[in-house]
Amino acid sequence: MDTKTVFIVDDDVTNLTVCVNALASTYNVFSFSSGRLLLKRLEKQIPDMILLDIDMPEMSGFEVLRHIREMEDATDVPVVFLTAKIDVDSELEGLTLGAIDYIFKPFSPLLLLKRIEVHLLIEQQKRELTDFNNNLLEMVDEKTQTVVELQNAILSTMTKLVDCRDDATGGHIDRTQRYMKVLLMKGLESGFFNDESLSWDIDLLVQSTQLHDVGKIAIKDCILLKPDRLTAEEFEEIKKHTTFGVDVISEIQRNTEDHKFLEYAKIFAGTHHEKWDGSGYPAGLKGDEIPILGRAMAIVDVYDALVSDRPYKEGFSHDKAVSIITESRGSHFDPAVTDLFLSVSDEFNAISA
């Protein structure tokens, strides 16, 4: 273990000699007859501890300590006052300035040595604890990042599985996520979402849109991959992907503690096919009964369906898709959300290109 360095400051030669003799066999000791000399040395070397007399002619110990605490490299150096002043006010002033202890003169050399030993041990333990906490925080951050990366990888794999099963809508999940971010950021910027958005974690919210079609995993291939228009019976079957999605996400919730991301995902999965006039599915919700996030997702989902190619149709132009959505304002779509969409439709066009 490295030998600790102690600086001693006292204008009394006798006191300096006693201190140096008491500590020299254990520590690297340097003595100074004034605060000015100490401060000059601190510009070149920082000790492990400073023993500082209070009553000195040029500059009092209190003044010296104020200067020490203003020095960037020395601000945390432990300072112990050596003093013959036994009064509460002086002691309180020193402790307020940042001294860690008082040793009153005359003192026993052995007691001085022991007090310094204890304080240096405490300071060492404080540094070790700080280092440990910093390392622990780094470990926690690294572990958290690893878990987040794993969660993202699993989420990405699940959504790609849905996308791959539904060949007709390849890239749909990625595009809808990007559309939703544009729509939400515009709504936040304009104050559209008001107080409702105060509790939102936007990053989690946008990411959770990837699960809006997760229920399609449970839909039979003969229906999901059918190259022609669906029959009425088949359409009823594919509509179940909304409730299947909610069930899948609810099952995941039962096995995890952090539900915010999944709560967002459940809203998107369960309500993105509801319609403003109540004619949607699965619950036939109407107007404000539909969560605002579901109303936003409805436009995002339909826009991408309109501009994308399908086995039974070619994708519409951006202008045609905007026209269709505008015509459905107040029936399929929330009028206010439709207007929000129209204000950023050019950005949707850029994403779909």
Image: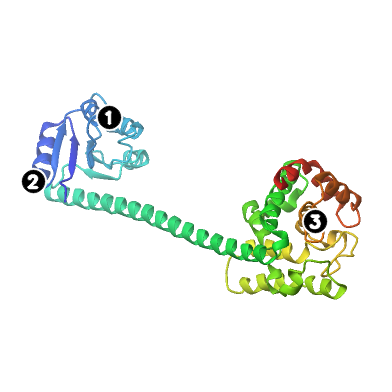
Q: Residue at (69%, 51%) from the top-left corner?
A: 198
Please, what is the three-letter code of the amino acid marked with disc 2? Ser
User: Which one is closest to the eye, mark 2 or mark 3?
Assistant: 3
The crowd level at tag 2 (other Cα within 10 Å; few <14, some 14-19, many 20+) is: few
Q: CA distance from mark 1 to mark 2?
A: 29 Å
> Dot 3: what SS?
helix
Q: Residue at (29%, 31%) from the top-left corner?
A: 64
Q: Residue at (70%, 46%) from the top-left corner?
A: 351
The foreground one among 310 and 36 is: 310
> Dot 2: what SS?
loop
Residue 212 on image: x %, y %: 71, 63
Q: CA distance from mark 2 to mark 3?
A: 83 Å
Q: CA distance from mark 1 to mark 3?
A: 78 Å
User: Which one is closest to the eye, mark 1 or mark 3?
Assistant: 3
User: Which one is closest to the eye, mark 1 or mark 2?
Assistant: 2
**Label disc, if present, on residue 302 of the rendered structure:** 3
Location of mark 1 (residue): 60
Location of mark 2 (residue): 25
Q: Which image quadrant for residue 135? A: bottom left
Labels 2 and 3: the sequence-earlier one: 2
The foreground one among 173 and 122 is: 173
> Dot 1: what SS?
loop
In which quadrant of the rendered image does the C terminus lie?
A: top right
Q: Please indicate, yes or no, whether residue 219 appears anywhere in the rendered image.
A: no
Q: Please indicate, yes or no, whether residue 90 appears anywhere in the rendered image.
A: yes
Labels 1 and 3: the sequence-earlier one: 1
Q: Is residue 212 left or right of residue 158?
A: right
Q: Is residue 141 left or right of residue 118?
A: right
